[in-house]
Every structure is written in structure tokens, then in C-alpha cells.
Image (cartoon, rainbow, N blue to C red):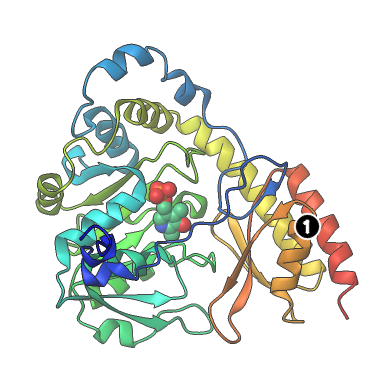
């Protein structure tokens, strides 16, 4: 009996062979220049860090189940009401909550590709269906997306890996053409200087997910939120874990969101360096997609993206090599500090010189 017992026999069939989402490498130790997971190169607001005081007392008690303090501050920043916001353990949890709410085994979700790879993992976990449509070469949306009639449509805006972004006018038109729920994933929207949150009032089928991981330099905190019509927010509250955000993350996120001066200063520095990186890569012969995010998508005409990635890695520089099929591979490079970007460009110069 014990011999023949296998845990995988008890796992639901659609989960047995599931390969979980594979995040970018997070080397433990070593002294890498880490430009592979779009983390902010600067430390977070000192007000955010200071919010960790009284940790003992915060930890003794259960957290506010709906993160009221955060929702009030975020509502003010975005010009929506606190009842239009639900918070989560990173925007990844927000995406999972939405998938769980809408999709059963017969339902399907759609998104333009290439984009954030987690969408597929979440749909697989749910045992639901999905369909993807290639972006056009100029990174506009394929027509099929508008005819898909899906239970859920994901659009990352700005998109990863391309860094391209639809402006609010374009988005309004896009959302109006999709009959079902549309989730605009705004993980990088602060770097584009816009948010579709202001469209929620006029677009009843719109959801906007946001995170403090990138623009607020708090990837380790795990805090994200969704902005949508109050009716949907109520459904999400009744289906999420009761304490999905812990007391420390609520305190830090609230303080970070309250420090908009820090955000403005950080954005200015990152955008300045984005320009440096774009120009430097172009000078080295890369074709560079103009970015509205905190990373740059570039391709080398020699088609040597993977060997360039490996050569950088041996030089202790991590970037993200992405291969989305034939003729769609490239490097996604996070904007670092001036010193990091300079080292990167110098090393790339050496590497590219040696490519025939
Ligand atoms: C980083 C990222 C997220 C996840 O953000 P977390 O809040 O850290 O979970 C979501 N969507 C996209 C497109 C991202 O790049």
C-alpha cells in the first residue's frame, strides 16, 4: 500500500504537469549588476522604510482586512474613490483573483503576445482556456483580439517586453471595442506618466491593475491593487483571502504612496537613464524599441541575443534574454543607475566588437 502511494495521483489532472511561472534569475550572493527583472535601481522612499517602526505592535494584531488607509491615499492620487480599489499581495495576486472570479473550465481568456508570461500560468492553474494573438510588427493590436469574445482580455500597458504603450485616447477606443471584461495591467504605467484609472468611470468593463514593485522600488514588499467599478470590487472582496495583505506591507505601501515627491524624483532619474540606455544601445548597432517603461527591448542584427546574454552573465551582468519564437528574440534590459548603465554599455561594446 505505502509503496504504491504517489502524491501526483491525487493532484488534479490539469495541475500534474504544470510548469510554474519562471521568474527572472534572483542570484543569491555574488555581485551582479542586476538588470533582468525591472526592479527599480534606487532604494524606496525613506518615509516608506520609516513606516516599519512599531513593527512589534503591528505584528501582534491582525491587519486591516481591506487596507483602508492605503485605499484612501491611492484613491486620492488616482482621482477615484476608495470603494473602487481592492489590494493584493503584489499585482500577481490581483491577476490571480480576477482569473479565479471569471474563468471556469469552459471559459477562455485572450491577450496579445508577446507579453507577460504569467497570464498563461494563471489560466493553466485555473484549468481554463486561452488564446493569444500576435501583436502587429508595429506593436499595435491584432484585429482578431476584438472578435475573440472572451470572458477576460489582458493588455499590459506599457507592454513587456516591448515597452510600448497606448495613450489614454487609444485605450478608450480599444476598451470600447471589446465587449467583455478588459484588464489593463499597469505595472509600468508610472514610467509612461499616465493611468487608465481615470477611464474606469466611463468604461464599465475596465479593470486596471497596478503595483508598487517597479515605480515605488518595493518589489520585495509584495503589494498591488486593482481599480474598477464598485460592483466588481465587491465581488473580489468576497472571494479573496481574508487577510491577503499583511500589516507591514499595508503600512509601507501607504507611506510610499503618500510620498509622491519621491516618485516624481525617481521617475525623473529613471527616465533620464532610459534615454542614455536607448541611445547607447543604438550606437552599438542594436535596434531599440522606444520605451515608455523602465526597461528597453532591443535586438541585435546579428541574431546573437542569447550569446550576448551569456557573455554579459560571465561578466556579472544579468539582463533578460527572451525568445518568443523565430524572428522574435531579443534582450530586455532594465534601466539601472548611471554607473550600472555605463558598465553595461562598456561591456556590451567589448562583446559586440567580437561578433563577426
Ligand atoms: C512585474 C509585473 C507584474 C507583477 O507585479 P507584482 O506586483 O510584483 O506582482 C505584473 N505585470 C507585469 C506586466 C509586470 O511586469
- Looking at the image, which is closer to me, 83 or 4? 4
From what the image shows, is residue 337 above or below residue 127?
above
Residue 327, image x, y percentages: 61, 86
Say above or below: 202 vs 135.
Answer: above
Number of labelled discs?
A: 1
From the Cβ of disc 1, is ligand 1 less than 8 Å away? Answer: no
- Residue 315 image offset from top left, x and y in percent: 80, 54
For image coordinates 55% across by 56% down, the residue present is 24
**Res 225 → quadrant:** top left
- Residue 288 x/y as whole percent: 67, 70
Q: Element under label 1?
A: helix
Relative to 46, 169 lies left or right: left
Can the viewer see residue 261? Answer: yes
Is disc 1 surrounded by few (<14), some (14 to 19) or many (20+) residues within 10 Å? few
Q: Nearer the viewer, residue 279 or 172?
A: 279
Of the 4 image quadrants, the one containing the N terminus is bottom left
Residue 219: image location, x then y, percent: 47, 42
Quadrant of the image containing the C terminus: bottom right
Q: Does residue 214 appear left or right of residue 156 in this picture?
A: right
Residue 177, placed above or below residue 50: below
Please tell me in which quadrant of the rendered image residue 162 appears.
bottom right
Residue 194 in view (yes/no): no
Identify the residue at horizontal 75%, vertical 62% (top origin): 279
Please indicate whether residue 318 sits to the left or right of residue 22 in the image.
right
Q: Quadrant of residue 119?
A: bottom left
Q: Residue at x 61, y 55 (%)?
A: 36
* Residue highlighted by disc 1: 314
Amino acid at each position: 500500500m505505502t509503496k504504491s502511494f504517489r502524491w501526483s495521483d491525487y493532484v488534479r489532472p490539469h495541475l500534474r504537469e504544470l510548469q510554474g511561472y519562471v521568474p527572472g534569475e534572483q542570484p543569491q550572493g555574488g555581485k551582479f549588476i542586476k538588470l533582468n527583472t525591472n526592479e527599480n535601481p534606487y532604494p524606496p522612499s525613506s518615509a516608506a522604510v520609516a513606516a516599519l517602526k512599531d513593527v512589534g505592535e503591528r505584528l501582534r494584531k491582525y491587519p486591516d482586512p481591506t487596507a483602508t488607509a492605503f485605499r484612501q491615499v491611492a484613491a486620492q492620487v488616482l482621482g477615484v474613490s476608495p470603494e473602487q480599489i481592492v489590494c493584493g499581495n503584489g499585482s500577481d495576486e490581483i491577476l490571480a483573483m480576477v482569473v479565479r472570479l471569471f474563468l471556469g473550465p469552459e471559459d477562455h481568456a485572450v491577450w496579445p503576445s508577446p507579453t507577460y508570461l504569467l497570464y498563461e500560468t494563471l489560466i493553466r492553474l485555473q484549468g481554463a482556456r486561452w488564446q493569444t494573438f500576435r501583436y502587429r510588427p508595429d506593436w499595435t493590436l491584432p484585429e482578431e483580439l476584438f472578435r475573440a469574445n472572451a470572458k477576460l482580455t489582458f493588455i499590459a500597458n506599457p507592454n513587456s517586453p516591448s515597452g510600448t504603450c497606448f495613450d489614454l485616447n487609444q485605450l478608450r477606443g480599444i476598451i470600447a471595442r471589446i465587449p467583455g471584461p478588459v484588464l489593463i495591467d499597469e505595472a509600468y504605467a508610472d514610467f509612461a506618466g499616465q493611468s487608465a484609472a481615470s477611464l474606469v468611470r466611463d468604461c464599465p468593463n475596465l479593470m486596471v491593475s497596478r503595483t508598487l514593485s517597479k515605480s515605488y522600488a518595493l518589489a520585495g514588499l509584495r503589494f498591488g491593487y486593482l481599480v474598477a467599478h464598485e460592483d466588481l470590487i465587491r465581488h473580489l472582496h468576497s472571494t479573496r483571502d481574508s487577510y491577503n495583505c499583511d500589516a507591514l506591507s499595508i503600512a509601507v505601501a501607504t507611506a510610499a504612496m503618500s510620498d509622491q515627491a519621491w516618485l516624481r524624483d525617481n521617475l525623473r532619474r529613471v527616465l533620464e537613464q532610459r534615454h542614455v540606455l536607448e541611445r547607447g544601445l543604438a550606437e552599438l548597432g542594436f535596434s531599440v524599441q522606444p520605451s515608455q517603461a523602465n526597461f528597453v527591448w532591443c535586438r541585435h542584427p546579428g541574431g546573437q541575443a542569447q550569446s550576448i546574454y551569456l557573455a554579459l552573465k560571465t561578466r556579472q551582468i544579468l539582463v533578460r534574454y527572451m525568445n518568443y519564437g523565430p524572428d522574435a528574440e531579443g534582450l530586455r534590459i532594465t534601466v539601472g543607475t548611471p554607473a550600472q548603465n555605463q558598465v553595461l554599455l562598456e561591456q556590451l561594446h567589448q562583446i559586440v566588437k567580437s561578433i563577426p
